[in-house]
Amino acid sequence: MTTTTPADETVEPGPEPPSPPPARSGAARRRRALLGVALAAGLVAVGGVGAATLVKSPAERAARTAPPPNSLLTAPVVSQVLTPSTAARAVVYPPVQYNVVPTAASAEVTALYVSELGVKPGDTVSAGQLLAEVSGQPLFALPGPVPAYRDLKPGSTGPDVAELQDALAGLGHGSGEDDKGSYGPGTAAAVSAFYRGLGRPVPTTGATTQQAVDTAQKAVDSDRQTVDNLTAQKRAGAAAPQNPPPPQPARPDRQSRPTQQSQQQPADDLDQQLATARKQLAADEAALARAGAVNGPMVPAAHVLFLPTLPATVTAVNGAVGSPVSGTLLSLTSGGLTVTGQLTPGQAAGVTPGMAVELLTEDTGTTVHGTVAEVGAPTTAPPAGRVITLGGAGAAAAGAAPAGGAPGAALGGAPAARPAAGQVAGAPNSQSGSPSYLPVTITPDTPLPATMNGKNVRLTVLKAKAGAPVTVVPVAAISTNAAGRTSVTRVDPAGTRSTVPVTTGVTADGLVAVTPAEGAQLRVGDQVVVGK
């Protein structure tokens, strides 16, 4: 169709916009309606389920709140070896601890300082080993039963000298021709060799004894010179020519005797002088020997630490190089470890020497076997070893308790009155007012390792040797009726119960051996009632 404008211009009409198909619009509306209906139905269903869970009938409520049905606790019948035993606690500790308190070896030392340390805690000390140096003084260990209580020097005699000789001989330094227990030149030579081996100057008896030797030596030298001169004069007189005397007028014999005596007098005087000089020489030589016998190399008591058993173990070092020494510097133990069990009177019943034991360290799993050596009398004192102070004065050590121990008895003195002296850390019954117990001394089959020192361990005393396997049930499975007869209740797979008369035997670890009565049956694997 053509439209004509007043200007006779022709305008072409544009395309008309399409209209939506009416059928597609209706389908969309239907889908939306169906979706709404489905959503509503879902909500209704969910609500119904929730309501159903909240709404309970009286029967359902009663069923849910009723107590659970009775059930049986059962345990299997087994076959195993039963060994009667008693379990308790035990403490491991050193039997003797030595606290070393250094002292000055001479008046020249006015203060004590640690100038060198040769060991640390845990080290093993052997014979002849240097432990420390205090104000330039060495401190070394030697084997010996008696602690050093005096300086050992030339002229000394006694068992402690023999102890020193034996210790040095064990290190390869013999005492030569010296008698046992007598400090002579051979022992002095051995002492010198030992100190040189340590790289330390050899201590001597000092200036006083040396001056005595020097004075005696000068006297001997002077005496020898006198004897030599007189001897030379006598020889010279004997070698001179003998001229005949001039003729003399005849005189009675009694008048000639004085002349003969006057001729012999110079020779007699020389002989007398020589005899006197020789006598003085002998006396001065004896004095020189006495002076020399007490002069020379020595071992100050402050230098040596005699221990009954070596090697030993260092348990504490209370100082560092340059620090002042006050009280105990070192603590050592020797002779292995001791273990003491603690049993109540009830547990101790039936425990006798010779019974086998087992020691268990729970934190490391270390197990050591042994035997009961002794069952002691009841006591409340905690198990502990003796503490011995070496060197110094007892009072000097009284206030210095090293790690792992407390001061006890000074050498030659009585133990300090301290209830906790020597107490091992972690020991049971260590509090005041603790109940009494019976100490049980244990002899280990093998030496206890050092890692067990101070540990509180589990002790199991095996009261009988292991025998053949037996039929056992838990002790809780045994029932006893009014007549005193014992039985167990067996449960079969269907849940049927039956009473089985039994005779009980040995008990251990919560189990008891049982033997079915004649005509009854109880097999390994059966279930028996132990509770409800």
Image (cartoon, rainbow, N blue to C red):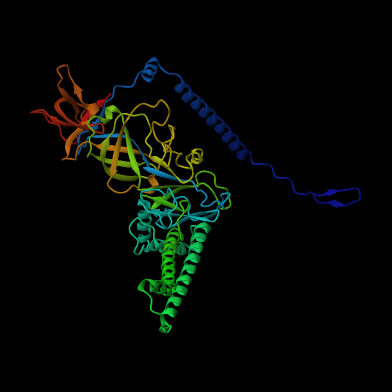
Q: Position of residue 507 (x, y in %)?
A: 21, 31
Is residue 217 visible to the viewer in this orientation of the structure?
yes
Residue at 47% x, 74% y: name it. Answer: 229
Which one is nearer the viewer's eye here, 317 or 240?
240
Which one is nearer the viewer's eye here, 33 or 478?
478
Q: Position of residue 41 (x, y in %)?
A: 51, 28
Which one is nearer the viewer's eye here, 263 or 512?
263
Is residue 309 visible to the viewer in this orientation of the structure?
no
Q: Quadrant of residue 234?
A: bottom left
Q: Residue furthest toward the right?
A: 7
Residue at 91% x, 48% y: name it. Answer: 6
Q: Position of residue 427 (x, y in %)?
A: 40, 35
Q: Quadrant of residue 86?
A: top left
Q: Horizontally, is 7 left or right of 203 in the view? A: right
Q: Residue furthest toward the top?
A: 58
Please say if 46 is above or below 261: above
Residue at 41% x, 80% y: name it. Answer: 248
Q: Position of residue 93 (x, y in %)?
A: 38, 42
Which one is nearer the viewer's eye here, 1 or 229?
229
Q: Residue furthest toward the left?
A: 519
Task: Report the quarter where the C terminus lies.
Answer: top left
> Tag count in the figure?
0
